Image (spheres, helix red, strand yellow):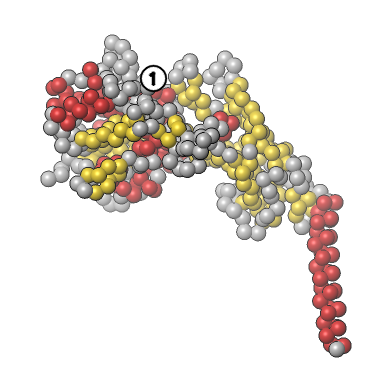
Amino acid sequence: MLKRMKKKVKAALICTIAAGTALSFSTGAAAKEVKTQPTSYQTVTEIEDWGPAITKLIVDLGKPVPVNSLTTDTFNVHVVRSDSRLASPFLEEGYRKVTKAYVADKNGNPAVKTGKYAVLEMEIGPSVTLGSPMNFDLGSFLNDWTESEYTITQQKDILTPAGKVSGLAVDTYTGGAIELVDEFSTGKASYDGVTLTYADFTPDKDNKKNPLIIWLHGMGEGGTDATIPISGNKAANFASDDIQSNFGGAYVLAPQTPTFWMDGFTGFGDGTSKYEEALMELIKDYVAQNKDIDPNRIYIGGDSNGGYMTMLMIRDYPEYFAAAFPTCEALLDSLITDDQIQSMKNLPIWFVAAKTDTTVPVDKYVVPTYNRLIEAGGSNVHLSLFDNVVDTSGLYKKADGTPYEYDGHWSWVYVYNNEVSKTINGKTTTLMEWLADQSLNHE
């Protein structure tokens, strides 16, 4: 009996000590403020279906803190967006919603016990403009990176064994990362007075020939910053593991025009381009400089303005490319002669567009051109004509619960996500699977 009582007293004492220690930690931490080193933040940008979004901040707290010491209410996040190209640069400001907060290392990886950094993930979406690091200027009709100035203000104490961290106001920016885009290099080349910039992705060296995917940007991605053609929409995704796996590794070349591919010699979209010869020279030079590119597997595609340029390239160099995938292409069918249809009909082509496209109505552009190619005997010519363009991730919906709907011109969304497919020879085949199978030396 006495032995059992001693055990109970001992257990109660242990509980009292533990409770006292916990109380001491919480009240002591609340009573004592610890000093921190200088604070700062970095941004992490990801390219979404609608374009780039700053998805998270990595905040240097200036002091290691325990895991589980942060909540979504620990900080509020304010941003001011501006575009230095504009006469009045200010665009908007406001508070971003923090959806997740956790302690991490300097690279943003969740910490095991303690970490000196806080990762703040934030709400994003096709209509959440506060998260966008890019702006489309209606004056120039070009996208460009904006200035996004963040202030991260602490709202609740962070408790540590040494005391509390409180009162942080972080507004020093030390750089940022853009996922996938950072895996590309950039360059420029000039031909007869025409300078083209470009972004390119190089696959891992594998002692074999690799195909080349050429992507030509749309109207809003011209200029001299070659990161914009792969960031203004999701073209960087050609370097993703999902798409690269279809090719066993592929080069990606994204040339950029200083203005618009549709700048013709007599007018805009007149069936010519001031950049066509320079573009072809750039492609040939790029292939020559990268000896492991398979010259039999060079594929070309592009959206809108880039779809227009894709049509010009396969019209004038039909023997050079193994396949083409023009998307919402903007070359009027009335500008394509019967002889040009004959020269293109044997080239594997997969057109992509949406019926709701009011920018380049399909009945004046892609549909009659596709029909003419089929009538001419094109045996490997395909058309994926979507009813509209909607979010397929399931993350974004309209008020009635149906999928969020994008502008009908944005059929490139399906291309970047490899969500274009059809039954070919009895098998469901995606666009990228089909593309990877095309070669000039097929028997």
Residue 37 is at least partly visible in this image = yes
- The residue that mark 1 highlights is 259
Q: In which image quadrant can residue 263 be found?
A: top left
Q: Quadrant of the N terminus?
A: bottom right
Question: Is 14 situated above or below 187?
Answer: below
Q: Position of residue 429 (x, y in %)?
A: 27, 46
The local crowd at label 1, few if under 14, some if 14 to 19, many if 20 or more residues have their Cα within 10 Å, is some
Left or right: 37, with 148 as reference point: right
Amino acid marked by disc 1: Thr
Residue placed most toward the observer, 401 or 79: 401
Residue situated furthest top in the rendering: 266
Image coordinates for residue 57, horizontal then vertical, percent: 60, 41
User: Is residue 31 left or right of 429 when viewed as pictured?
Assistant: right
The residue sitting at 34% across, 28% down in the picture is 355
Q: Is residue 219 left or right of residue 146?
A: left
| Residue 122 % position (x, y) | 60, 40
Q: Is residue 294 visible?
A: no
**In the foreground, 422 or 204:** 422
Please state the horizontal and vertical placement of residue 323, each as a whole percent of the image.
23, 36
